[in-house]
């Protein structure tokens, strides 16, 4: 009767295609009784195939810095349900992704195996919570995403590993002056899981008697709050400008919030990028 071979120490894993078995006392010494154990052990590709499930490439770059053509490159190792890739370099147009684009929308880019060739496709379905595959379908490897503007045009971007950068920072707040925390909406430009963003902010103050302070918060509280200060203007009719580039954590279901207090301040905020 076959005997199950179970690893005695960490790491343990469930062998691909079922438990590995070996002969037990009293079994006839046949080729099959020995090969049942050693063939699976010799087939290292089975273990490797299981081991790279859900892994990212050692480096991963996706560039579409003109909003028209893209370039994807990566090196070992990721796989769909049917194929793994080592080093890969593929370029084409956004049109080739097969999407009908709408204004102010998000689209996700995946690689899938079609007859031994990588096919790059776009989809409206977001990736799984680990951002490895399309949610519910491991035939599709998640690569990147893009947003469209009010004219349904892709907003140019560059992605290196998990850092996503807009070719041109996107202005999401223009001369805001609210004295209480007010949301800056990011829903049409960032995926719903993003929690860390980078911004360029510019605060102007026309008050000659008092400075002003602009605060940007994760969720309208002091949690994760970032401040920028603009001193008072030097003369009537003049303006003092303060500028900064800030990494700001956000609540992905809400977006960041801002407020401007003191002086006569107005804040403009440009979204530079985010960590996916």
Image (cartoon, rainbow, N blue to C red):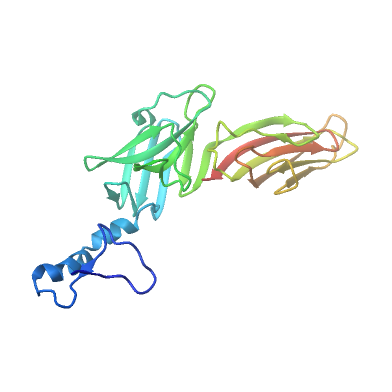
Question: Where residue 144 sits: x, y (%)?
Answer: 44, 41
Give left or right: position of 240 versus 35. right
Quarter of the image for residue 220 reads top right
Q: Residue at x 36, y 67 (%)?
A: 12
Q: Quadrant of the N terminus?
A: bottom left
Residue 49 placed where, x, y %? Answer: 29, 56
Q: Nearer the viewer, residue 175 or 223?
A: 223
Q: In which quadrant of the rendered view does residue 213 lie?
A: top right
What x and y, as percent, mark residue 176?
74, 31
Q: Position of residue 78 (x, y in %)?
A: 35, 51
Which residue occupies the foreground of this view, 45 or 217? 45
In this rendering, the count of numbered labels is 0
- Left or right of 161? Residue 254 is right
Q: Residue at x 27, y 48 (%)?
A: 83
Is 86 situated left or right of 240 in this image?
Answer: left
Q: Is residue 194 above or below residue 52?
A: above
Task: Looking at the picture, tell me which residue is in the foreground, 223 or 226.
Answer: 223
In the picture as drawn, the residue positioned furthest to the top comes out as 151
């Amino acid at each position: 009767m076959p005997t199950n071979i179970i690893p005695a120490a960490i790491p343990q894993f469930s062998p691909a295609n079922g438990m590995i078995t070996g002969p037990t006392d009293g079994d006839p010494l046949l080729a099959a009784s020995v090969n049942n154990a050693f063939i699976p052990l010799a087939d290292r590709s089975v273990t490797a195939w299981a081991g790279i499930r859900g892994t990212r490439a050692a480096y991963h770059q996706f560039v579409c810095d003109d909003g028209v053509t893209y370039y994807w490159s990566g090196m070992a190792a990721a796989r769909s349900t049917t194929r793994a890739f080592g080093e890969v370099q593929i370029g084409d147009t956004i049109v080739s992704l097969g999407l009908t684009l709408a204004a102010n929308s998000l689209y996700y880019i995946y690689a899938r195996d079609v007859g031994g060739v990588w096919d790059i496709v776009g989809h409206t379905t977001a990736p799984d919570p680990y951002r490895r595959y399309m949610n519910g379908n491991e035939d599709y490897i998640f690569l990147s995403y893009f947003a469209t503007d009010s004219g349904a045009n892709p907003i140019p971007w560059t992605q290196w590993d998990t850092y996503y950068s807009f070719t041109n920072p996107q202005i999401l707040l223009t001369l805001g002056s609210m004295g209480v925390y007010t949301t800056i909406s990011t829903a049409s430009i960032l995926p719903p899981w993003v929690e860390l963003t980078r911004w360029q902010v510019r605060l102007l103050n026309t008050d000659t008697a008092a400075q002003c302070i602009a605060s940007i918060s994760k969720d309208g509280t002091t949690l994760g709050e970032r401040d920028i200060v603009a001193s008072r203007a030097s003369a009537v009719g003049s303006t003092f400008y303060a500028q900064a580039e800030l990494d700001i954590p956000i609540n992905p279901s809400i977006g960041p919030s801002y407020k401007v207090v003191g002086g006569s301040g107005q804040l403009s905020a440009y979204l530079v990028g985010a960590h996916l």
